[in-house]
């Protein structure tokens, strides 16, 4: 269970430390190699996937000056050195720019390019993941997963050693089984090398989510399925297959493997127990999927044609050469449970007296921050090269809530005595007139972000309304209602704000 501790005092991160140590000396890829089906790509931002791996796991880029740094491991075969990221990203925000391939084949994942669909970033590229958005512990060590918000995606269209055609391969990934949606398509695996839909059988990737647009399984989802292009498959039939269960472990192991007229999907709890087989048998009874026409690109968080509507969270995953045995996968699952993934509570960023900037998390708008210009409040794109005035306009001191000290108020960094408040349900920056209505209008109560990222800020006097951006203006909005800015579309994204160290500290 994730819980956000909200306090105006500095709250130390409370970390659950499991007793189990890292399974030193053996990683999932050592197990696949012993089974004769070696990893040809191995990706993780949380830990080494080979017992001997001591290189960089991933690269982050910070907003303050666009500098990058690599995050390595604490020890060979061990967990990520999260302190590298924490130090480098202190007082600013960071995105994950590269997820390195640990297999030595150079199959790194970087910002996905446009394909059949454009992403929301410049040039039609997909967004990069916020490096701080998916904190966990692994073996008691803090680490960060890859939080894929809609619009986010990683890819490598020029790989080495990944299966093509009908050649056999295997793969597994660890996802957050509680974070998904029905959009297309939160995938990890083998896809087209031109980012386009090249027809049935041109991809073979793990899918996780509750899309019923193609296949689905028992219950309401989410399900582990195989994205084979123009179809998510839960078994031999298009559409429904009863043996693919709804599965939503907080840490979820999912496996997929495919070879000549044979494939299988399996899954289980990444914190304990074994894998169950959801399908194992011949290729789907739909034309175009036997033999397969795999192309060997690698995707994370998107569909083969760069469909970018899905969300999910990725911690680690690999692709293998050859069809792993169930026994090999079972040993990998044992290694995963021994690695001891756990949730971590987050220290509150709402520390009285600290200056913060509030960044939008909706896919369109992840570079936009709440800013004022005089009394007008909007969201504005702020970058390292923005003017000092723009940066200060996007910076606010956290104050104890004027109407309720267990909530917060935001005082302008460069207009002392003026606060963000709503008026006619729109945010403005006004001088505190010491009335009780001003105090209430300027008080907001934080809770975990409605879309799983950052925080949502409820109005203290209209408690079903949350600070929301809409057409780049800022309101207190309800989830559905008569005003355009109450639109239910994108509401949970629009009301979720990443709280960062201020552009002007
Ligand atoms: O197969 C499902 C999706 O269909 C693929 O991911 C995408 O390429 C296509 O839109
Ligand atoms: O924003 C809604 C209300 O509009 C505020 O509480 C009040 O100040 C104004 O009338």
Image (tube, helix red, strand yellow):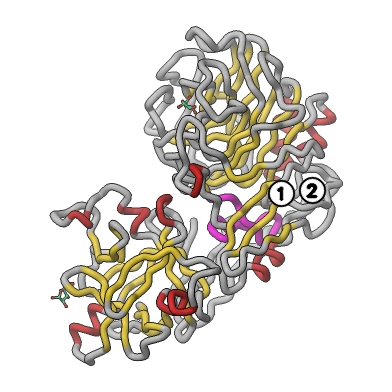
Asked if residue 188 is positioned above or below residue 227 in the image, the reply reads below
Tell me the CA gap for discs 1 and 2: 6 Å
Q: Nearer the viewer, residue 215 or 356?
A: 356
- Structural crowding at the residue carrying mark 2, measured as other residues with C-alpha within 10 Å and reported as few (<14), some (14–19) or many (≥20): some
**What's the residue at 77%, 53% (across, down)?**
56
Residue 390 shows up from this direction: yes
Asked if residue 295 is positioned above or below residue 338 in the image, the reply reads above
- Structural crowding at the residue carrying mark 1, measured as other residues with C-alpha within 10 Å and reported as few (<14), some (14–19) or many (≥20): many
Asked if residue 91 is positioned above or below residue 489 in the image, the reply reads below
Q: Which residues are magenta?
A: 131-147
| Residue 111 location (% of width, % of height) | 59, 45
Q: Quadrant of residue 329?
A: top right
Q: Secondary structure at mark 2?
A: loop
Q: Is residue 54 magenta?
A: no
Lower position in the chain sequence, tag 1 or tag 2? 2
Q: Is residue 253 left or right of residue 210?
A: right
| Residue 27 location (% of width, % of height) | 79, 42
Image quadrant of ligand 2 equals: bottom left
Residue farthest along the left direction in this orientation: 482
Image mark for residue 339: 1
| Residue 96 location (% of width, % of height) | 61, 54
Q: Secondary structure at mark 1?
A: helix
Residue marked by disc 2? 23
**What's the residue at 44%, 73% (across, down)?**
6
Residue 243 shows up from this direction: no
Q: Does mark 1 have its CB less than 8 Å from ligand 1? A: no
| Residue 396 location (% of width, % of height) | 42, 79
**What's the residue at 63%, 52% (across, down)?**
97
Image mark for residue 61: none
Q: How many marks?
A: 2
Q: Is residue 140 magenta?
A: yes
Q: Are marks 1 and 2 in contact (CB under 8 Å)?
A: yes
């Amino acid at each position: 269970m994730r819980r956000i501790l909200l306090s105006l005092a500095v709250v130390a991160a409370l970390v659950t430390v499991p007793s189990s140590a890292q399974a030193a000396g053996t990683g999932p890829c050592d197990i696949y190699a012993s089974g004769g089906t070696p990893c040809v790509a191995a990706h993780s931002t949380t830990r080494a996937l080979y017992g001997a791996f001591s290189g960089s796991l991933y690269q982050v880029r910070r907003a303050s000056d666009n500098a990058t740094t690599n995050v390595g491991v604490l020890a060979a075969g061990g967990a990520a050195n999260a302190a590298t990221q924490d130090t480098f990203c202190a007082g600013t925000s960071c995105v994950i720019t590269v997820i390195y391939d640990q297999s030595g084949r150079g199959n790194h994942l970087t910002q996905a390019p446009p394909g059949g669909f454009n992403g929301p970033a410049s040039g039609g590229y997909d967004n990069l993941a916020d490096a701080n958005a998916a904190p966990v512990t692994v073996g008691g060590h803090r680490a960060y997963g890859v939080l894929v918000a809609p619009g986010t995606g990683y890819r490598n269209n020029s790989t080495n050693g990944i299966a093509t055609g009908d050649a056999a391969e295997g793969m597994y990934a660890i996802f957050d089984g509680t974070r998904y949606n029905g959009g297309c398509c939160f995938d990890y695996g083998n896809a087209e090398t031109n980012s386009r839909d090249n027809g049935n059988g041109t991809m073979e990737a793990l899918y996780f989510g509750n899309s019923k647009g193609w296949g689905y399984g028992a219950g309401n989802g989410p399900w582990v399925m195989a994205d084979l292009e123009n179809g998510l498959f839960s078994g031999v039939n298009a559409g429904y297959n009863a043996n693919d269960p709804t599965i939503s472990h907080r840490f979820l192991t999912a496996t997929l493997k495919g070879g000549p007229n044979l494939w299988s999907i399996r899954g289980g709890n990444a914190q304990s127990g074994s894998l169950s087989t959801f399908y194992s048998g011949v290729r789907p009874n739909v034309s175009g999927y036997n033999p397969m026409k795999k192309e060997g690109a690698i995707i994370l968080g998107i569909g083969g044609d760069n469909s970018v509507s899905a969300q999910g969270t990725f911690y680690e995953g690999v692709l293998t050469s050859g069809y792993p045995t169930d026994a090999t996968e079972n040993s990998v699952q044992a290694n995963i449970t021994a690695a001891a993934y756990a949730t971590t509570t987050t220290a509150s960023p709402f520390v009285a007296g600290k200056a913060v900037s509030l960044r939008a998390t909706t896919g369109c708008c992840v570079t936009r921050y709440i800013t004022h210009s005089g009394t007008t409040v909007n969201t504005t794109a702020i970058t390292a090269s923005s003017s000092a005035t723009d940066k200060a306009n996007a910076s606010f001191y956290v104050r104890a809530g004027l109407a309720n000290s267990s909530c917060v108020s935001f005082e302008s960094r460069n207009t002392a005595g003026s606060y963000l408040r709503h008026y006619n349900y729109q945010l403005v920056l006004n001088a505190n007139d010491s009335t009780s209505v001003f105090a209430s209008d300027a008080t907001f109560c934080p809770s975990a972000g409605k879309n799983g990222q950052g925080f949502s800020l409820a109005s203290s006097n209209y408690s079903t309304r949350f600070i929301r951006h809409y057409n780049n203006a800022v309101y207190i909005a309800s989830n559905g209602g008569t005003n355009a800015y109450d639109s239910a579309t994108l509401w949970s994204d629009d009301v979720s704000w990443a709280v960062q160290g201020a552009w002007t500290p």
